[in-house]
Image: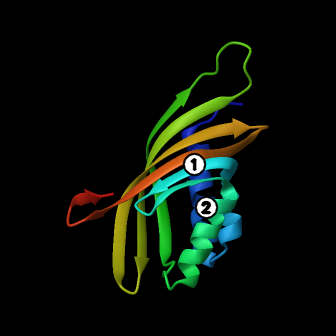
Amino acid sequence: MELNVDMAQRLADTFAEAWNRGDMESACQSYAKNAIFISSSGTLVGRKNILNHYINSRNNGFNLGHLKFRVVEFQPTNPPTGKKFFIAAAVLDWSLTYDSMAKKGKSFVLYQLIEGQIFIVQSASFRFSNGSALS
């Protein structure tokens, strides 16, 4: 099985659907156990730490809003001969709308196929404000 853009979009949609329901635990199942997440608030390592970050953000008044992703660039790699892992890199546009406001940005995501299931192993996100990127 090889990673493809449709798999990446389905995983992004699954994450967004869980996020939009407020189900952070299901959303974070998209991350590998040892995933790395980078955002303006810092670097997190591990699915549990990423989940705790989202839960703490929500508990501190962060409005989850409505999240949507679109894969805009996808680059699979072929595994070395004899290896059983597949990796792909993607750039996603995202939008988060709430209270008649919207935030937009991009995420760079590294996917890995692990035992037949696609996971996010690394993710770095940033948002745009007034047409410029903010880290």
Q: Which residue is mark 2?
A: 50
Q: How is the image coloured?
A: rainbow
For badge 1, the amino acid type reads Ile
For badge 2, the amino acid type reads Ile
Q: Residue at x 35, y 65 (%)?
A: 104
Residue 83 x %, y %: 72, 20
Task: Name, please, the residue furthest toward the top.
Answer: 81
Q: Which residue is mark 1?
A: 36
Classify residue 122 by image quadrant: top right
Q: Residue at x 44, y 58 (%)?
A: 39
Task: Note whether 42 is above or below 88 in the view shown.
Answer: below
Could you tell which of marks 2 and 1 lies nearer the N-terminus? Answer: 1
Classify residue 54 by image quadrant: bottom right
Nearer-the-camera pick, 127 or 67 = 127
Residue 1 x %, y %: 72, 31
| Secondary structure category for the residue under label 1 | strand
